Structure formats: structure tokens, C-alpha cells
Amino acid sequence: MREDETPIVGEIAEEAPPADGSAATQTKKHGFSSKLGFVLAAAGSAVGLGNLWRFPYLAAKYGGGMFLLVYIVLAVTFGFTLLTLEIAIGRKTGKSVIGAFTSLNKKFKWFGFFCLAVPIIIVPYYCVIGGWVTKYIWAFAVGDSALVGAGADTAAYFASFSANAWQPLVFFLIFAGATVAVVVFGVQKGIERVSKILMPALAILAVALAVYACCQPGAAEGLKRLFVPNFGDLRFETFLAALGQLFYSMSLAMGIMVTFGSYMKKDASIGSSARQISICDTLFAIFAAMIVIPSIFAGSASAEAANEAMKASGPSLMFVVLPNMFNAMPGGRIVGAVFFILVFFAALTSSISLVETIVAVLRENCNLKRWTACLIVFGVMLVLGTLSSLGFGPLSMVHIGDKTILDIFDYASNSILMPIVAIITCILAGFFADTESLMDEIGMRKKGYRMYYKIMVRYIAPVCMAAILISGIFLSL
């Protein structure tokens, strides 16, 4: 049987259930070929736009060094626990999100559908932003004078481009097509192979750009802001911001790690893999901040101007502020092109994992070939992505408050659905599933670790997620 004929999630074939009703034995067919392949793919999912345009902004806004310290502490505790939990759920059940949560407790089958809504909502607008990145690579590569060089009005350029009806759609299609093309080839030949190329490339580009940015005149002040903690900045808002970023950055509550966990070899250590994923994600976030914050200080006329520039977030930071700073640097055209190539790679690895999560569900539950499932997902991406793209132009009158269509999708997924998914996952794993069996899957043996894990999953993590959910709703009012 060829891979594209296998009707089971993630190339996992299941034997028929034994007559006595005991659990079926699962045989891996075409999951990740090695622990390295899994780690690189999962790390590629975690390393994305959130690291590049959200982490630097939050670090600058919430105290720099203090924010970084809080983030690292939360990554080691809270983030690591949830990451291992989702991977363990996937590997133990060998299924995509719907089948996985149903296997843990049949009463939670509905929750699998709820969880699936997250990647369905995120990936279309994520690919729209990926299309913007693709356009900026082209603009810096050819030296478009409207964007590149002294005197270029980067704000006007982005406003004009994003409001155009057709250009953003063309680049959105390019990025979305590249994403689906990788997923069509499967886990080993597509996702794993591409991750083994893009992740080392990401590391090289990130280090090179960080070194260059940190060597610019005035960059030292930015580095001081990033790495020197001021305990006067330790506030509840700092904790919530770091927790929210961690939650978004590590691809938690999207179904991704459950799906990838179902492809993981049984002899690979979940704990070791999760540590490596966390380290990769955190290091990339730090290097992203080392690129962005020093570049802003180096390209600003004064510290006051730098502080004002760092108030920008999201698209404004990525597509207006940073290009303006690159234009003030020696070799800014090359730096800008390399930076947006870096962003492209990071966005692509994340969008691939989002698409695979949806494709896995379709293959498992609808008995579809991989290419058919990919075609269906691509169709959904076209519809929702077109709405997001046109929300800056012909559909700009469609909004809720000051939120465009893209903003609405982003808010619904990141501020509402993802915290709810995380809360219910913890409640399910902590109270309605075999928690001991999940800890065995992770490889926890010591009683102290097991007790800590139970407390974190049952009580601490749900409370923290509830705080993110409530604060997200409150701040939007």
C-alpha cells in the first residue's frame, strides 16, 4: 500500500480491535523517522511569527530583562509541563485531536472538534501574513525605492500594499501553496525533510542577523534593555504577558503537538524531546529580540525615539518600523532581505504544522487520501484567507470596534479559543483520564516529579490559563 493510500492519521495504521475489547495495537508506518526529525519539526512549529513580532515587542514593553527572566522561568515549569502533556496524549493514543481526546474519555469527543477550530481559524490569516513577508522579500531583493533606501515612507508603502485588492492575494496564494505542497508529501518526505533544511537555516540566519544588529552604533543600549532585569518591572502584567507569549510561542492548545506526538517513535524520550523543543524556541525568541531591539536603538536618533518606536507591535513593527530601521543601517537592503527570508522560513514551518493538524483529522475520520485532504484544507484556506486579505482593502468596512477581519480571527483564536482549549485539556488529563498512564508515557518515575506534574496539570495550569482568558477579554473591552 502506498503512503497516499493509507487512510489513517499521520501514517499510523491500526489493527482491528481484539475480540475481548482491549485496546488495539498500533503500528507506526510512516511517522517521524527519528527523534531529531520530530524535534526539528516540532521546534519549527513553535518558532514562528510570534517569536519575531510578538516577543520583542512584549520584552520591550514589559521591562526587557525582567520579562525575559519571567519568560524563562515559565518555560521551564508551565510550558514544559503542557508541552509534554500534549505530546504524551498524541503518542499514547496514536491519533489526531478528535480521536486522541475521544480515546482519553469518550465523553470528550466534542472537545476534539472544538480544538480543531483553532488551526482552521489561524492558518488562513497566518498565510496572509506569510504572503506579506514574501512580498517584502521581493521588495528588498529588487531594491524597490518606495520601501528601500533613505527617504522611503515605509508606513505609506505597507498601507498601500495591504489595501490593494489583488497583490496581497497573489502573495497569499504563493505562501499558502508552498505550505500545502510540503504537507502533500507526507510526514517523512515533506514535513521532516523540510524541517531538517529550514531549521538549521533559521539558526544560521538568526545568529548572523543578531550579531550584525548588535554591532551597530547605539545597539548596546538595546542589549542592556533586553538582558538587564529591573525588579521594579516585576508586576502581575509582566507575568501575564510572559505567560501569554509562552502559550502562543510553543504551539500549545492548537492540536499541533498532539498530532506530532502521534507520529513520534515509542523509543524516543518525550521529556528529552520537549526540553530540546523548549530550548530551541526560547533561544530563537531571544535572538529575535537581539535583532529587533538593538536595530531599533541603532536606527533611532535618540533613546526617546527608540522607546517610541518600540511601542509598535504586530504588522506595524514588522512591516513599518523595522524596514525603516534597516534603511538607516549600512547595507540595509541586504539586511532587510535576509531578515524577511528568516521570517518567511519561520512562518512556513509553523503554517505547515497547522495544516498537517487539520489534514490528519480529515484522513483519520473521513478515510481520505492525503492529497484529497490537502485539497480540502487549501480550499478552506482560500476562502478564509481571502476574507482576511480583503479586510484591509475592499472589505475594510467590515470590522468589530477597531478590529479588521484578520484581527477578529486572531483575537478569537489566540485570546479566546486557545486558553479554553488549554484549560479543558488540563481538566481532562488531570481528572477525567488516566493521569498515571500519561505520566508513564512521558517517562516520569520519581514520586516527587509525578506529584508536581499532577498539581501543575490539575490546578496551576488551569488557573493561569483562566487568568489569560479573563485578561484577554477584559483588555478588549
Image (tube, rainbow, N blue to C red):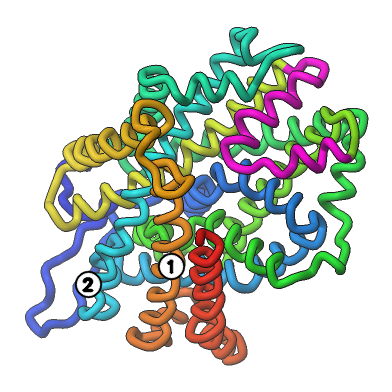
Q: Tell me if residue 77 comes above or below residue 7 in the rendering.
A: below
| Mark in front: 2 vs 1 | 2
Q: Residue at x 61, y 65 (%)?
A: 243
Residue at horizontal 86%, vertical 61%?
Answer: 229
Q: Which residues are magenta?
A: 304-332
Which one is in front, 436 or 246?
Answer: 246
Q: Is residue 25 left or right of residue 423?
A: left
Residue at numbered disc 1? 86
Marks 2 and 1, how far apart at CA: 16 Å
Q: Quadrant of the N terminus?
A: top left
Q: Position of residue 231 (x, y in %)?
A: 86, 68
Q: Are marks 2 and 1 in contact (CB under 8 Å)?
A: no
Q: Is residue 445 visible?
A: no
Say whether residue 216 is visible. Answer: yes
Location of residue 237 (image quadrant): bottom right
Residue 336: x and y, percent?
67, 22
| Tag of residue 168 | none
Residue position marked by numbered label 2 in the rendering: 109
